[in-house]
Amino acid sequence: MEAGADLDVAVVGAGQAGLAVGYHLRRTGLGHLLLDGSPRPGGAWTRYWDSLRLFSPAEHSPLPGWWMPEQPGEPFPTAGHVVRYFTGYEERYALPVRRPVRVRAVRPDGDRLAVEAHTPDGPRVWRARAVVSATGTWGRPRTPDHPGRDRFGGLQLHAADYRRPDPFAGMRVAVVGGGNSAAQILAELSQVAETLWAARREPRLMPDDVDGRVLFDVATRKAAARREGREADGVGALGDIVMVPPVREARDRGVLKAHPMFERLTGRGLRWSDGQEWECDAVVWCTGFRPDLEHLAPLVAPGGDGTVPTEGTRLLADPRVHLVGYGDWTGPASATVIGAGMAAKAAVKEIKALLEG
């Protein structure tokens, strides 16, 4: 299918969620393209910090149809290994990916959806009968407008821009946030710098034997219970921090001790409401992300948390649009490698029924 031609389905994004959607679409016979804004395969995994690991072993982190190969000497595969797997996956299934193509807007166009994009050859529009948005969240880092941010004279960066600890050697660094990114970045920064961890509430460490397999199972059970009108504990009941090996090692060194959130930044560091201060050279904001959904603005306005109303993966504002890979609100554990496959299968099933009905 050539760029600019009419399509049955346009998939926006070719990271883990987009690849899973592409796998299931190729089995339907529907004409489709995957439009990816990155210059190379791998999705957000090409932009993560160097030491990031999967939360699960390779055999428990597959995309549909092909098991992720093991990485020798690494029980939890590295980001580079995941990128190689995604690259091979595209080739194995000959998925029709166009890149770099940055989709700017999806808007109604008669009985179609116009997918407006910027390509290396200039602006281009595809007309599709259905659209799957699979852009994830990494492109929309969230940094709170904390008092004094504009006064701090040191370095500030979000986890999305962090790569490795070496540039921080010998510094005093504050890591802000209570989730997995904060714990993993703190774990390695603490080996080369003096660190302080600040969070709005005390982070809860998960049991050592909880990994991505357990999290996926818990999320799946909760989703099933919700469909049946029952209550069930979700992933949040287990804690906040998955104890991957570097984080366990940091805990054993006594590093994982979070301070309450500071009241404001000063020109030289942090200040708490009781007057205590901590001077530092840098602040790393590990404060999360919002869904990257700007291209859907002509169809729906995101809420305060950045999400849009959906039923399963289907956008309530337009049933021709599905969202895959943004978190539990678009399918159980759909922001994980293995969870993306389940959400993708459900979305493609609905799209096929819509287009062939």
Image (cartoon, rainbow, N blue to C red):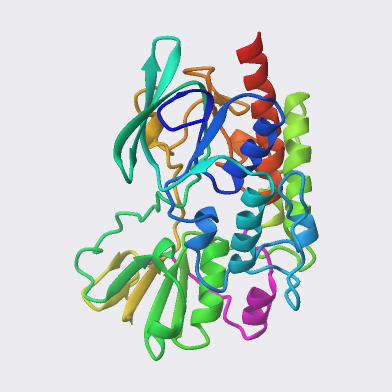
Residue 261: x and y, percent? Answer: 42, 64
Where 24 sits versus 177, above or below? above
Residue 356: x and y, percent? Answer: 65, 12
Residue 264: x and y, percent? Answer: 29, 65
Residue 81: x and y, percent? Answer: 64, 66
Looking at the rendered structure, the number of numbered marks drawn on it comes to: 0
Where 170 sits versus 275, above or below? below
- Queried whether the magenta region covers residue 251, the answer comes back as yes
Residue at image coords 39%, 91%: 170
Along the line of sight, which residue is nearer the eye, 122 or 186? Answer: 122
Residue at image coords 44%, 85%: 166
Left/right placement of residue 226 relative to residue 119 reads: right
Q: Is residue 324 visible?
A: yes
* Residue 254: quadrant of the picture: bottom right
Question: Where does the magenta region start and end?
Answer: 240-262
* Residue 69: quadrant of the picture: bottom right
Along the line of sight, which residue is nearer the eye, 2 or 30? Answer: 2
Q: Residue furthest bottom?
A: 170
- Queried whether the magenta region covers residue 109, the answer comes back as no
Q: Is residue 233 visible?
A: no
**Quarter of the image that includes the C terminus:** top right
* Residue 276: quadrant of the picture: bottom left
Residue at image coords 19%, 68%: 151
Where 295 sits versus 95, above or below? above
Left/right placement of residue 17 relative to residue 182 reads: right
Left/right placement of residue 316 relative to residue 127 reads: right
Residue at image coords 39%, 52%: 142
